[in-house]
Image: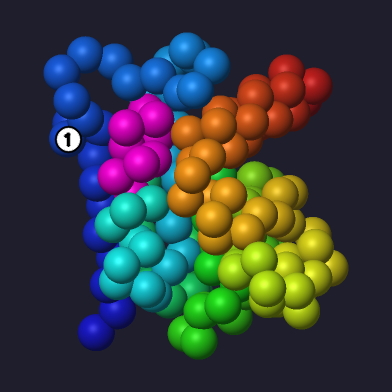
Amino acid sequence: MPLILRIGASLLSDGPAFGASGRQNVGVKLLILEDNLMWAPRLANGAKQAGWEPVILDHLPSELPAADAAIVNLASAKIPAAEAIARLREASVYSIAHAGHKEKPLLEVGRDSGADRVVSNGALSSRLAEILDAAAQAIQAKTAQA
């Protein structure tokens, strides 16, 4: 049975959560397309600490939940990354794709599929708040242009 875990804003620590720049990001929805049981909770917890509302998906559903941004594991065996990124683009969802720094063909899949940002696993792990803050800024800029 597929795992869909929603971690709501009510689970945030007392008071508002802020991204790396000090900007409040509470209520910004983040899909985490991740079937790795070690990565998924780490990403969700980091996103929650940065003020995002994460939703973990261990598969690509026929209908994506509404979201502002998404993190896609390019190395997932269960999630077709290129299709996921294409569908996220169609839905105007900012996408962050990741794979190991030595997995150059997978990183190229992310770039070729049109991910808004492609990063290594190490960068995502060590700079998650900064990467999510940049995503929030890009989303805000895009919204301001519309």
Q: For the point 70% across and 55% down, which residue is it?
A: 118
- The quadrant of the image that shows the N terminus is bottom left
Q: Secondary structure at mark 1?
A: helix
Q: Position of residue 130 (x, y in %)?
A: 55, 32
Please tell me in which quadrant of the rendered image residue 120 appears.
bottom right
Residues 88 and 32: in front is 32
Q: Read off the residue under disc 1.
A: 11
The majority secondary structure of the magenta stretch comes to helix
Image position of 96 with respect to 73: above or below: above
Q: Position of residue 140 (x, y in %)?
A: 65, 23
Q: Is any atom of residue 100 visible in this view?
A: yes
Specify whether residue 126 is painted magenta: no
Residues 104 and 2: in front is 104
Image position of 79 with respect to 135: above or below: below
- The quadrant of the image that shows the C terminus is top right
Q: For the point 47% across and 85% down, which residue is it?
A: 78
Please tell me in which quadrant of the rendered image residue 86 appears.
bottom right
Q: Is any atom of residue 132 visible in this view?
A: no
Q: Residue furthest right?
A: 112
Image position of 11 with respect to 60: above or below: above
Q: For the point 39% across and 74% down, which residue is it?
A: 35
Image position of 116 with respect to 135: above or below: below
Q: Position of residue 135 (x, y in %)?
A: 62, 35
Magenta segment range?
44-52
Specify whether residue 45 is painted magenta: yes
Q: Residues within 10 Å of mark 1 (few under 14, many from 20)?
A: few
Horizontally, residue 88 falls left or right of residue 49, namely right
Q: Position of residue 32 (x, y in %)?
A: 44, 57
Three-letter amino acid code of the residue under disc 1: Leu
